């Protein structure tokens, strides 16, 4: 092989490698751009999810506070307890009254009936 032939072969390989490197450079640039776009989109969605979670947490705290004020106040619980105790006392009084009536019936049955003959 002569010098010009070697130079032609080396030039051909340099040209082919340059074309391949240029193609690779173009593809790599497009991939990096696409990765950057996807990463930015994911960051936006993650921020939106964090904001939505914070809003849900705030709404839940507000609901808990409202529910505790509306449905389970200390005064309301005391009132409910007092009503239940009065109802239980009333039932106890009725049971006592029924017991007295039963005792009276039993006492009347145990009294010997006196018959007067005439």
Image: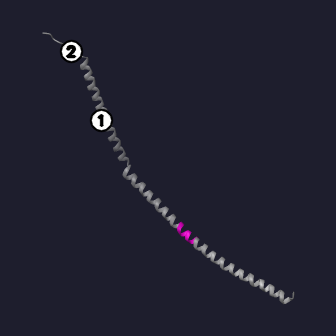
**Along the line of sight, the residue nearer the viewer: 110 or 9:** 9
Number of marks in the image? Answer: 2
**Along the line of sight, the residue nearer the viewer: 94 or 19:** 19
Examine the structure image and report whether residue 49 is included in the region drawn in magenta: no
Look at the image and give the residue range highlighted in magenta.
39-46
Quadrant of the snapshot with the N terminus: bottom right
Q: Please state if 27 lies on the left or on the right of 81 as rendered.
A: right
Q: Residue at x 77, y 84 (%)?
A: 14
The answer to whether residue 102 is above or below residue 55 is above
Q: Residue at x 68, y 80 (%)?
A: 23
Q: Nearer the viewer, mark 1 or mark 2?
A: 2
Quadrant of the snapshot with the C terminus: top left
Q: Which residue is mark 1?
A: 90
- Residue 85: x and y in percent read 34, 38
Prevailing secondary structure class for the magenta stretch in the rendered image: helix
| Colouring scheme, one of rainbow, by chain, secondary structure, one colour | one colour
Q: At numbered mark 2, what does the secondary structure look like: helix, strand or loop?
A: loop
Q: Which residue is mark 2?
A: 113
Q: Residue at x 29, y 27 (%)?
A: 99
């Amino acid at each position: 092989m002569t010098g010009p032939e070697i130079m032609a072969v080396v030039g051909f390989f340099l040209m082919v490698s340059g074309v391949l490197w240029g193609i690779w450079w173009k593809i790599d640039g497009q991939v990096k751009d696409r990765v950057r776009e996807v990463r930015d989109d994911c960051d936006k969605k993650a921020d939106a999810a964090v904001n939505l979670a914070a809003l849900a947490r705030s709404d839940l705290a507000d609901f808990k506070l409202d529910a505790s004020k509306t449905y389970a106040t200390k005064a309301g619980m005391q009132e409910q307890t007092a009503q239940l105790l009065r109802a239980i006392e009333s039932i106890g009084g009725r049971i006592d009254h029924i017991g007295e009536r039963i005792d009276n019936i039993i006492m009347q049955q145990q009294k010997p009936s006196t018959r007067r003959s005439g």
